[in-house]
Image: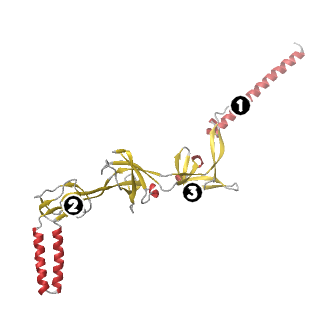
């Protein structure tokens, strides 16, 4: 081998050795860089997150507030009558199902002693009017009024127009004062007491119309209206504030009786408006505090505290906070790009 060949062979070996060192060095740099990346950025090394900035407009949505109702109906009025004195029953003048009018005599108890006591007092009044003093006469008049009331207590009369729902007395029975004997109901109208959530009470007004459907008459809808709103609410065992609102059915159709159940709806008299914001625009901090970033006209970003309720489909209703329709919200989202490769 001549000198030229020897030199070329030597140079070839040197280039090969040098290239090998470069490859090894590059490999080491890549390995060390990758190790450092994983050590310094353990989460981002697995997947790179790309941050995107978005803008959204606060929009208003108008809808009709509908409150679901359910319950059962009762007679408009119901009263169980009692004898207010003690004795044997001398007369029962009605039976179950009878129609009665206000003040109608329903049953009587022996009133012999009451009549005798009243007559004795009236005799004393006649004598006092001739020979007694004014003071004595006034006292006898008071005793006469008391005796007349005792005589009335021997009779049971209807407290209102209605129907006899039950009769638990017969002529000749002996009763103590206070015993229940006859029940009178007014079914010309029906009422229902419905438990309404405190959140929905803001939409309830006296006279407001409701639509009810009964299982006994699924072929028709029955109109009712709010007849009574209590001054006080109450707290349920589930920790919810409610109000017991009374509804009235003026002319119930046939086939609907006290005790029958219904379902229905009550619509707010006026449309309800709400402000909607994207759920992604809401930032939550400690204790569940919520805020959004608002882009002002001058381009500045202001953080505004809010309170929201999630509605679904990525939207939340603004319950409180200094926001208006048309305000622009600025927020960021992050997306994963995949694994890093050397």
**Residue 190, percent across and down?**
33, 55
Could one spot residue 215 in this view of the protein?
no
Taking the spot 67% from the left edge, 34% from the top edge, the residue there is 34
Q: Using the image, determine if residue 206 lies above or below residue 29.
A: below
**Mark closer to the observer (2, 1):** 2
Measured as percent of width and height from the top left, residue 294 is found at 64, 53
- In the image, which disc is placed on residue 28? 1
Calculate the distance from the C-alpha at mark 2 to the C-alpha at mark 1.
103 Å
Q: CA distance from mark 3 to mark 1?
A: 56 Å
Question: Between 12 and 170, which is closer to the camera in this rendering?
Answer: 170
* Residue that label 3 marks: 321
Of mark 3 and mark 1, the one earlier in the sequence is 1
Q: Are marks 3 and 2 in contact (CB under 8 Å)?
A: no
Label 2 crowd (10 A; few <14 / some 14-19 / many >=20): many
**Depth-wise, is mark 3 or mark 1 nearer the camera?**
3
Q: Position of residue 78 (x, y in %)?
A: 27, 58
Q: Position of residue 325 (x, y in %)?
A: 61, 54
Work out whether residue 295 or residue 264 is closer to the camera in this orientation and state it: 264
From the viewer's perspective, tell me whether residue 183 is left or right of residue 194.
Answer: left
- The residue at which mark 2 appears reads as 81
Q: Earlier in the sequence, mark 2 or mark 1?
A: 1
What separation in Å lies between label 3 and label 2 (alpha carbons)?
A: 58 Å
Picture quadrant of residue 103: bottom left
Q: Is residue 39 visible?
A: yes
Q: Furthest residue to the top?
A: 1
Quadrant in the rendering for residue 334: top right
Q: Give the camera-side residue of 163 and 260.
A: 163
């Amino acid at each position: 081998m001549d000198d030229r060949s020897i030199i070329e062979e030597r140079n070839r070996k040197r280039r090969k050795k040098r290239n090998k060192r470069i490859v090894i060095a590059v490999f080491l740099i890549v390995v060390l860089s990758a190790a450092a990346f994983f050590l310094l950025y353990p989460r981002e090394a697995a997947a790179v997150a790309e941050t995107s900035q978005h803008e959204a407009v606060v929009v208003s949505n108008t809808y009709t507030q509908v409150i679901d109702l359910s319950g059962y109906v009762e007679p408009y009025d119901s009263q169980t009558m009692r004898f207010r004195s003690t004795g044997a029953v001398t007369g029962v003048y009605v039976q179950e199902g009878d129609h009665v009018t206000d003040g109608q005599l329903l049953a009587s108890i022996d009133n012999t002693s009451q009549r005798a006591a009243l007559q004795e007092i009236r005799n004393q009044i006649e004598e006092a009017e001739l020979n007694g003093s004014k003071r004595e006469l006034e006292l006898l008049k008071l005793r006469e009024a008391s005796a007349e009331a005792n005589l009335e207590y021997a009779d049971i009369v209807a407290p209102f127009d209605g129907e006899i729902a039950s009769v638990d007395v017969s002529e000749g029975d002996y009763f103590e004062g206070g015993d229940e004997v006859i029940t009178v109901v007014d079914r010309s109208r029906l009422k229902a007491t419905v438990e309404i959530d405190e959140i929905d009470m803001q939409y309830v007004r006296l006279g407001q119309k409701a639509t009810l459907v009964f299982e006994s008459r699924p072929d028709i809808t029955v109109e009712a209206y709010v007849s009574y709103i209590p001054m006080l609410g109450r707290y349920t065992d589930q920790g919810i504030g409610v109000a017991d609102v009374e509804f009235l059915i003026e002319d119930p159709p046939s086939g609907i009786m006290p005790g029958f159940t219904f379902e229905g709806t009550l619509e707010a008299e006026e449309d309800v408006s709400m402000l909607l914001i994207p759920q992604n625009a809401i930032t939550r901090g400690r204790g569940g505090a919520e805020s959004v970033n608002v882009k002002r006209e001058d381009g500045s970003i202001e953080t505004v505290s809010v309170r929201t309720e999630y509605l679904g489909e990525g939207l939340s209703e603004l319950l409180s906070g200094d926001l208006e329709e048309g305000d622009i919200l600025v927020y960021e989202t992050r997306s994963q790009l995949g694994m890093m490769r050397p």
